[in-house]
Image (cartoon, rainbow, N blue to C red):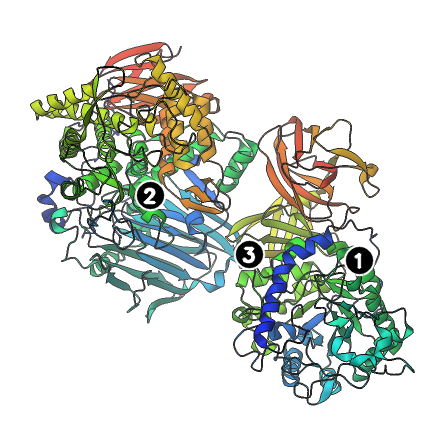
């Protein structure tokens, strides 16, 4: 969750105001965080606890989508009141009956299990969250037991830090920690932390602090929980700065969980700072890359708020996903079109991106009311296999238009290829085999429709509805593409404006061309091809944030292409850009125009169009 | 002496552009009776009327069209994108935009006469006209038809393809679903007065779904097969649908029609209003029940197979389409491999000419003209096509460029018969326009009133509706521009019957100006001249200037046209002499000593925006023909016009670019004319200026908001034709502004010339290699190219092939 109000605001109307304010603030908050040149090396994710945890993106259900919605009837006792024992058990039973056999496993209780309907928290004598007796009359262990009885796993939730209401004047004893009280585990100035400033920041220089985390972990382990979502974690959750740096909290949780001996999946939320990706990978099993997918409106989600942000935000994170820790794109609310607030096409695209990005697949829908199309989306075994299989997550290969192609090369030589039309109207989308690295024929399998589409020469084009998608497995039957590489820093090129050559350890030949801003230009002077045609040139680039560059050939008209963020200023990614070349020598210009363009490492031109 | 047996126009005495016996409308006793009394005055009865069984050709002769007569795409439209992605169909009166979405075919159906509003003759406090959807009125949707086929959701079909066959007037979409190829055709038949949708398949598939016809104005559905209602302004309207198939079941289910397991399915829809173009009857036929008539029409059509309906339509359509062919050169295989939208995108991105696409753009405008301008009202700001009830500027008739531009290519590109809708409209409005002018123009609150205190003839405002009414501000010179446009049609066709028909419009406009012109003495001289009273050079600069170039040029041309018409018809000799003497006293514009531009106002100063969209002060260059770069016009004036045109710039939008292109063509600047055409061919992205997916021209009024205005779809092709041929009575110039992009080789047939000729022309390396001149009424003309000129004499109906015009 993102936006429930932890500060003492029992009046429902006021909560709404806070929700809106936070949603508005997002637009400016995140780019600032992502603009930091990060120094993280790409390191394999290190699983916490036993290897079984998060070996694959987890699958399941979360309570938050329905809690956060204004959909009629969902929250009869006030905001977020959907969360009750009865509802959790009902969803557990529905999941066991309908989805378990497809791999759905976790039933995750989100925020509020320790708060009454007025959102007042309750704690035990050790300052630990205690189940609200109205919401969970049988207690949290009983719920976990029921979930386990269905062969499923149970998830629970906490905000990061010591909740203010648990402080108790500093006198509350810490369980199993002789002499420790709440005063010992926070800073003297009671500085606050987390995405809502609802907790005091924990000072882990005092050993009592770890004891407090241990005591909470112990409780969850005793109750039998298998999953913990730690929310409001920073840097992230729209916060930055020392007070909101919760890396130590996350590390403490990892340690505490390990000490319990129970495998508990640790998931972090929300909009985690990519500059700390290495920390999240080191200490957790997954991290929300973005704000809430929920719209806090009359449906569960909406396309613009904020499903569609993921296409631009996911690429920077792709390389950080792997066994033990995954990029969490948030709930997958595609099960009931009317309640989700999405068209069929939007639901399919939503599920497609989550599957190929290898995001955890957990739905927030009412599992007792899945419509037939929603059930088909959530239970398509070919699509689930893409998500749960051993292949890498997909990356955009032609991201510069609303008509995008994303792809991943699979270990068996096939490609997972998704076509997306992010425009508000139908469009054709073409996947050129040359952007995948081969030419000639390929066999195409349509995963959503369970249909083999036969052999396609050089490309496949399909008509997609507004916000629509297709998902294919492409098996090459042709030849590998050969390329002519041109380094951006080559002395044969012309730099103008501020453009300059810079060192770049991650780049091919160790250099790149940067400072492409406000008029800075890079012109490749001698791009040779044998035959005239439209070529998908591969552009290797670095860009710590999403940027655009205008590409033109031979001094002709320029086309602006948007490049996704590579996550930091030391990581190279590549995308493909179509250019029309004449036979013989051509010039290709990358012009920053009036804005800021990515740094360019290298261009590869296919030897055939 | 080569007779042209296939060419229309061998008989100069008959009505222009009507092949005898080929006009299938107005055949019944009912319509003949209704028409008989009006034909002399109106010439046509553009109304929703009963029609007899059409002529049905036994077979369709093979096509002569070339590949560039077909546009194609790889995506459908949807409910929200129809104005950019819907494909237009129309039978001249009844039109639709079709989505061609496999899972949901959507047709937004229009009728040229479907308008809210009324006479609108109560002036506002400023002496001008109200301009709202209730009073002035608006062109608006007639009906909405959906055909839902749930199993054919777009996300589950493959190889989607969609074509618009310009040569046959057919929209076809096809796709593969689970190994079955499904095909769907949509066309609007003039002979059957209906829109037909034909769903077929090969491979053992079937269609199961639901179709719904409904209104878009809150009409309560009462049954599945038809609806009817009326507007507060009194207009009644209605529509009807029927469906039939084979191999399955089609049945009415409440307010929808269900079909299941059909191997094929035919849907026929028709509709209309009780509008009649007759001021005497207040533009309504109270006895006509449009819903009932629509039911009759769809039942009559449904007695025939879809194949028969299509064959009937194609034969009718091709009769018009094939009067003109065009090749501007050969495109590359790579260009040909792209769909139409990709081609527009690549053309703009790469800056490489695509001559077949450019020729197809012109043929598309001819498709729009045939589909949107036959036996009903003329094409309005949106042509015949809407995606909602409330089009910008009411989808009305704008009289200060837009309706005129809509018809600039009709004669030039072999569609003279489509021009009639424009002339017939003006004639049908004339009694009302005259009365409102008489009663209201000199209202003391009207800042444009005649200071002479006299009023005569007729005038209109900037906007006109279909109810005899005007909207927005008075536009004194609008009558002259309309009259000159109508007269130009005579120059192309030389039909005396037509000239007699429009003569009252010309004369009434002269009477208006005779009462309006005021005398002034030019400063520093004793020369007395006649000038326009307080007026507004359209949409630009001071709103109370006298003697604006726009009005002076238009009135100068009007008086000349009237005198020629009176002489030709041997009428009003004395009055014509009086008008001619007024003409000689008309002030004509000068060149500003400050700017070097031809003056827009009687002032050396620039009183407006340098790059303003309107070219009103250049109206004597185009569409007027007073300023000629051939030595007959003082060099100073040509230079001043050139300087002004240069200052207006090259980067405007649709119609403004098209008008600029035509002016540059007149100045024989091929590069600039071509660049402006290329500017209009730029793909419109997110509402930007340019050409939409469906080739409709889009005008970006604000960032991200583009409006379809059809005028550039006709003005841009008019520029193409003007670059190939300049004509005035007695003189033709071949390839006056041929750009390098088209120079290598090309050909055109059916290109009409003022003076009553039709030209067939081939060229290579920029010079004519073969020219044939055919007379549709003209007798003598010079034919020039470069420094070479020949004079030929032909009798009407005769043709001659010329050789040796190459330099």
Q: For mark 3, name the chain.
A: A
> Is residue B206 something one can see in this rendering?
yes
State the residue position of label 1. Answer: A276
Residue A436 badge: none
Image quadrant holding the N terminus of chain A, namely: bottom right
Using the numbered discs, state the Cα–Cα distance from disc 3 to disc 2 in whole angstroms: 31 Å
Using the numbered discs, state the Cα–Cα distance from disc 1 to disc 3 in whole angstroms: 32 Å
Q: Residues within 10 Å of mark 2 (few under 14, many from 20)?
A: many
Q: Nearer the viewer, mark 1 or mark 3?
A: 1
Is A555 on the left-hand or right-hand side of B699? right
State the residue position of label 3. Answer: A467
For the residue labelled by badge 1, is the local secondary structure a helix, a strand or a loop? helix
Instruction: Say if labels 1 and 2 share a chain.
Output: no
Q: Nearer the viewer, residue B24 or A595?
A: A595
Q: Residue at x 68, y 62 (%)?
A: A329
Residue B381 badge: 2
């Amino acid at each position: 969750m993102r936006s429930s109000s932890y500060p003492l605001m029992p009046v429902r109307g006021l909560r709404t105001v806070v929700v809106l304010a936070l949603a508005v603030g997002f637009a400016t908050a995140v780019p600032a965080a992502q603009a930091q040149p990060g120094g993280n090396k790409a390191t394999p994710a290190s699983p916490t606890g036993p290897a079984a945890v998060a070996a694959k993106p987890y699958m399941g259900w979360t309570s938050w989508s329905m809690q956060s919605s204004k959909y009629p009837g969902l929250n009869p006792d006030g905001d977020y009141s959907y969360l009750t024992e009865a509802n959790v058990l009902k969803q557990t039973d529905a999941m066991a009956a309908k989805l378990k056999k497809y791999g759905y496993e976790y039933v995750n209780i989100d925020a509020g299990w320790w708060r009454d309907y007025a959102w007042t928290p309750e704690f035990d004598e050790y300052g630990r969250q205690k189940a609200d007796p109205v919401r969970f009359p049988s207690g949290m262990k009983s719920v976990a037991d029921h979930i386990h009885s269905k062969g499923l796993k149970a998830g629970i939730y906490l905000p990061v830090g010591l909740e203010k209401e648990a402080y108790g004047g500093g006198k509350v004893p810490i369980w199993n920690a002789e002499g420790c009280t709440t005063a010992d585990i926070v800073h003297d100035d009671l500085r606050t932390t987390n995405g809502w400033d609802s907790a005091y920041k924990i000072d882990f220089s005092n050993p009592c602090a770890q004891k407090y985390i241990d005591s909470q972990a112990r409780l969850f382990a005793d109750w039998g929980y298998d999953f913990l979502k730690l929310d409001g974690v920073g840097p992230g959750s729209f916060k930055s700065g020392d007070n909101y740096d919760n890396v130590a909290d996350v590390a403490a949780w990892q340690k505490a969980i390990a000490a319990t001996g129970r495998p508990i999946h640790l998931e972090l939320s929300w909009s985690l700072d990519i500059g700390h990706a290495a920390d999240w990978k080191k200490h957790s099993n997954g991290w929300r890359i973005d704000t809430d997918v929920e719209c806090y409106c009359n449906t569960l989600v909406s396309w613009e708020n904020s499903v569609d942000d993921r296409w631009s935000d996911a690429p920077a994170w792709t390389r950080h996903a792997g066994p033990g820790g995954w990029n969490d794109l948030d709930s997958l609310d595609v099960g009931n079109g009317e309640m989700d607030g999405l068209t069929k096409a939007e639901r399919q695209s939503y599920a497609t991106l989550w599957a190929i990005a290898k995001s955890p697949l957990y739905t927030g829908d009412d599992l007792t009311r899945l419509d037939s199309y929603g059930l088909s989306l959530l239970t398509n075994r070919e699509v689930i296999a893409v998500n749960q299989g051993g292949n890498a997550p997909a990356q955009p290969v032609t991201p510069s238009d609303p008509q995008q192609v994303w792809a991943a090369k699979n270990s068996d030589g096939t490609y997972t290829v998704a076509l997306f039309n992010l425009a508000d109207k139908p469009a054709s989308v073409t996947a050129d085999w040359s952007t995948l690295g081969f030419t000639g024929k390929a066999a195409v399998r349509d995963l959503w429709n369970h249909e083999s589409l036969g052999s396609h020469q050089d490309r496949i084009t399909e008509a997609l509805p507004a916000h629509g998608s297709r998902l294919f497995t492409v098996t090459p039957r042709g030849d590998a593409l050969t390329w002519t590489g041109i380094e951006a820093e080559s002395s044969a090129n012309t730099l103008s404006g501020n453009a300059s050559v810079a060192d770049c350890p991650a780049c091919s030949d160790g250099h790149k061309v940067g400072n492409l801003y406000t008029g800075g230009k890079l012109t490749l002077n001698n791009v040779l091809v044998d035959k005239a045609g439209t070529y998908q040139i591969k552009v290797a680039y670095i860009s710590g944030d999403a940027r655009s560059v205008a590409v033109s050939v031979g001094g002709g008209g320029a086309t602006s292409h948007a490049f996704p963020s590579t996550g930091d200023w030391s990581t190279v990614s590549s995308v493909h850009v179509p250019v029309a070349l004449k036979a013989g020598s051509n010039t290709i210009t990358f012009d920053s125009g009036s804005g800021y363009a990515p740094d360019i490492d290298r261009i590869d031109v296919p030897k055939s169009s | 002496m080569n007779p042209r047996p296939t060419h229309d126009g061998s008989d100069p005495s008959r009505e222009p552009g009507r092949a005898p016996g080929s006009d299938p409308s107005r055949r019944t006793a009912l319509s003949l009776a209704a028409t008989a009394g009006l034909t002399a005055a109106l010439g046509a009865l553009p109304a929703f009327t009963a029609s007899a069984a059409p002529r049905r050709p036994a077979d369709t002769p093979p096509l002569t069209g070339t590949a560039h007569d077909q546009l194609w795409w790889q995506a459908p439209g949807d409910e929200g994108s129809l104005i950019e992605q819907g494909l237009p169909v129309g039978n001249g009166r009844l039109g639709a935009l079709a989505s061609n979405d496999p899972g949901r075919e959507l047709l937004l159906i229009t009728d040229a006469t479907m308008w809210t509003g009324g006479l609108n003759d109560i002036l506002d406090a400023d002496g001008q006209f109200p301009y709202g959807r209730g009073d002035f009125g608006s062109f608006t949707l007639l009906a909405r038809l959906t055909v839902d086929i749930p199993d054919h959701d777009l996300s589950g079909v493959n190889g989607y393809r969609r074509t618009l066959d310009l040569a046959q007037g057919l929209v076809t979409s096809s796709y593969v679903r689970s190994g079955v190829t499904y095909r769907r055709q949509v066309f609007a038949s003039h002979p059957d007065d209906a829109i037909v949708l034909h769903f077929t398949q090969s491979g053992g598939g079937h269609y199961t779904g639901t179709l719904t016809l409904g209104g878009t104005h809150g009409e309560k559905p009462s049954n599945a097969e038809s609806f009817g209602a009326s507007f507060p302004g009194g207009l009644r309207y209605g529509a009807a649908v029927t469906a039939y198939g084979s191999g399955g079941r089609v049945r009415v289910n409440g307010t929808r029609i269900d079909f299941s397991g059909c191997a094929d399915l035919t849907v026929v829809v028709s509709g209309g209003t009780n509008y009649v173009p007759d001021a005497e009857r207040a533009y309504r036929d109270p006895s006509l029940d449009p819903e009932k008539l629509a039911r009759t029409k769809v039942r009559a059509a449904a007695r025939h197979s879809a194949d028969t309906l299509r064959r009937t339509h194609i034969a009718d359509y091709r009769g018009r389409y094939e009067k003109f062919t065009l090749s501007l050169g050969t495109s590359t295989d790579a260009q040909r491999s792209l769909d139409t939208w990709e081609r527009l995108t690549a053309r703009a991105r790469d800056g490489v000419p695509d001559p077949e696409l450019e020729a197809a753009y012109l043929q598309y405008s001819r498709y729009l003209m045939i589909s949107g301008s036959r036996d009903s009202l003329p094409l309005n700001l949106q042509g015949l096509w809407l995606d909602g009830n409330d089009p910008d500027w009411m989808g009305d008739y704008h009289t200060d460029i837009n309706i005129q531009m809509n018809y600039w290519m009709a004669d030039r590109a072999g569609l003279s018969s489509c021009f009639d809708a424009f002339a017939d409209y003006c004639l049908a409005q004339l009694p009302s326009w005259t009365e409102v002018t008489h009663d209201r123009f000199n209202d003391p609150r009207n800042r444009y009133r005649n200071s002479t205190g006299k009023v005569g003839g007729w005038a209109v405002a900037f906007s006109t509706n279909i109810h005899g009414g005007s909207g927005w501000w008075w536009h004194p010179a609008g009558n002259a521009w309309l009259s000159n446009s109508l007269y130009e049609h005579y120059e192309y066709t030389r039909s005396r019957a037509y000239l007699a028909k429009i003569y009252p419009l010309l004369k009434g406009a002269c009477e208006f100006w005779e009462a309006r012109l005021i005398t002034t003495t030019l400063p520093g001289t004793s020369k007395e001249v006649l000038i326009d009273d307080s007026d507004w050079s359209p949409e630009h600069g001071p709103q109370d200037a006298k003697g604006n170039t726009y009005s002076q040029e238009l009135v100068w041309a009007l008086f000349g046209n009237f005198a020629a018409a009176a002489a030709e018809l041997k009428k009003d000799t004395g009055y014509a002499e009086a008008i001619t003497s007024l003409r000689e006293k008309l002030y004509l514009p000068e060149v500003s000593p400050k700017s070097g531009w031809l003056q827009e106002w009687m002032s050396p100063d620039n009183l407006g925006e340098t790059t303003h969209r309107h070219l009103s002060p250049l109206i004597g260059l185009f569409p007027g023909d007073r300023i000629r770069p051939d030595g007959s016009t003082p060099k100073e004036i040509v230079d001043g016009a050139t300087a002004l045109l240069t200052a207006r710039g090259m980067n405007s939008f649709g119609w403004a670019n098209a008008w600029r292109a035509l002016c540059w063509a007149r100045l024989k600047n091929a590069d600039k004319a071509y660049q402006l055409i290329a500017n209009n061919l730029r793909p419109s992205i997110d509402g930007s200026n340019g050409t939409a997916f469906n080739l409709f021209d889009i005008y970006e009024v604000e960032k991200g908001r583009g409006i379809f205005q059809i005028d550039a779809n006709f003005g841009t092709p008019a520029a193409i034709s003007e670059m190939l041929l300049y004509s005035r009575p007695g003189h033709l110039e071949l390839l006056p502004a041929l750009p390098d992009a088209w120079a290598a080789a090309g050909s055109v047939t059916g290109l009409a010339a003022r003076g009553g000729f039709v030209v067939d022309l081939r060229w290579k390396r920029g010079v004519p290699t073969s020219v044939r001149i055919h007379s549709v009424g003209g007798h003598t003309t010079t034919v020039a190219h470069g420094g070479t000129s020949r004079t030929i004499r032909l009798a009407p109906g005769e043709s001659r092939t010329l050789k040796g015009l190459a330099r």
